[in-house]
Amino acid sequence: MFRTRALLRTIAPLGDRVLVRRAAKETQTAGGIIIPADNAKDPNEGEVVAVGAGERDMNGTLHAVSLLVGDKVLLPPYGGTEVKIEDDEMFLFRETEILGKFE
């Protein structure tokens, strides 16, 4: 009998890059109108899944990323590199591309 094992892939961002999972698309308005999934806008917020170590300057000093795993962030409408890991769709952003952090 053969056994198959699911390969679990992980990704560790390099430098000042941040891996973000976008929030789910809104399919219903506040008034209760249902929007078709293909017409719904991509949300501009997400959750940090992984962060890189930081970026080095000209002197070699490491400047750590100011975000932590689990932080809720405000994302730009365009940009980021799409990364698919199995069925999860995530995006890689540089720390400077992220617009803000929700408290």
Image (tube, helix red, strand yellow):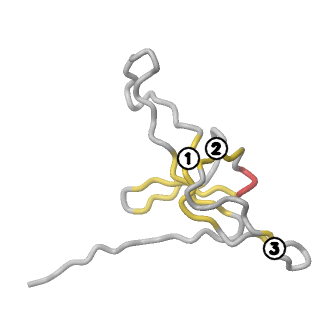
For the residues marked 2 and 1, what is the alpha-carbon distance in whole angstroms? 7 Å
Nearest the camera: 35 or 64?
Answer: 64
Quadrant in which the C terminus appears: top right
For the residues marked 1 and 3, what is the alpha-carbon distance in whole angstroms? 26 Å
Q: Quadrant of residue 64?
A: bottom right
Residue hosting label 1: 46
Please rate how many residues cluster around mark 1, counting C-alpha atoms within 10 Å: few if below 14, some from 14 to 19, many from 20: many
Q: Quadrant of residue 86?
A: bottom left
Q: Earlier in the sequence, mark 2 or mark 1?
A: 1
| Mark closer to the observer (1, 3) | 1
Label 2's element?
A: loop
Hey, what amino acid is under mark 1? Answer: Gly
- For this orientation, the residue located farthest to the front is 103
Please rate how many residues cluster around mark 3, counting C-alpha atoms within 10 Å: few if below 14, some from 14 to 19, many from 20: few
The residue under the point 64% across, 43% down is: 74
Quadrant in which the N terminus appears: bottom left
Q: Earlier in the sequence, mark 3 or mark 2?
A: 3
Label 3's element?
A: strand
Hey, what amino acid is under mark 3? Answer: Arg
The residue under the point 44% across, 27% down is: 39
Hey, what amino acid is under mark 2? Answer: Leu
Q: Could you say where residue 2 lies in the image, as x and y percent from the top left?
A: 13, 83
The residue under the point 69% across, 49% down is: 98
Residue hosting label 2: 75
What number is the disc on residue 56?
3
Q: Could you say where residue 60 lies in the image, as x and y percent from the top left?
A: 86, 79
Nearest the camera: 40 or 21?
Answer: 21
What number is the disc on residue 83?
none
- For this orientation, the residue located farthest to the right is 59
**Cβ atoms at labels 2 and 1 below 8 Å apart:** yes
